[in-house]
Amino acid sequence: MPPARRRPLTADQVVAEAVALADNRRYAADDVLDACAVAWTAARRAAGLWRSLPDPPEVFSDGVPSAIHV
């Protein structure tokens, strides 16, 4: 199967695993999904595939830049 077709299946499997972890009542579903999002973003960052939204980051009145990295 080509990689482009495998990616959505892999993502679906990750979500299914996250739901299974939450279903066993050890973890809250939103916490598991947040952890998955963090892992996904970290992997994109490590691979050099991340980007900033917005680009360039917005700078607040206190001088602190703010953006979401995906």
Image: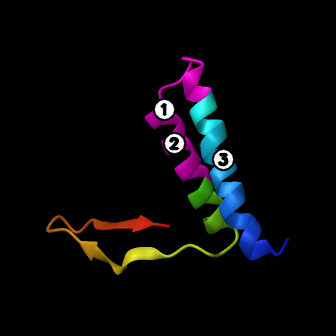
Q: Which residue ends up furthest to the top in the rendered image?
A: 25
Residue that numbered label 2 is attached to? 33
Q: Amino acid at mark 1?
A: Ala
Q: Image point 31% across, 66% down: which residue?
A: 66
Tag 3 secondary structure: helix
Q: Secondary structure at mark 2?
A: helix
Number of numbered tags placed on the structure image: 3
Q: Residue furthest bottom?
A: 56
Rendered position, 13 above or below 62? above
CB atoms of marks 2 and 1 within 8 Å: yes
Q: Are marks 3 and 1 in contact (CB under 8 Å)?
A: no
Q: Which residue is at the far right?
A: 1
According to the picture, the residue beneath numbered tag 3 turns out to be 14
64 over 24 or under it: above or below: below
Expressed as whole percent of the image width and height from the top left, the position of residue 45 reads: 61, 67
- The residue singled out by tag 1 in the image is 29
Residue 25 among those drawn in magenta:
yes
Query: In the rendered structure, does residue 5 fall within the stretch colored magenta?
Result: no
How far apart marks 3 and 1 lie (CA) works out to 13 Å
Separation of disc 3 and disc 2 at Cα?
Answer: 9 Å
Look at label 2 and name its amino acid. Answer: Leu
| Dot placed on the residue nearer the N-terminal end, 3 or 2 | 3
For this rendering, which residue is in front, 2 or 36?
2
**Residue 58: image location, x then y, percent:** 26, 74
The range drawn in magenta is: 21-39
Report x, y in % for residue 30: 44, 36
Residue at x 46%, y 66% (from the top left corner): 69
**Residue nearer the viewer, 58 or 13:** 13
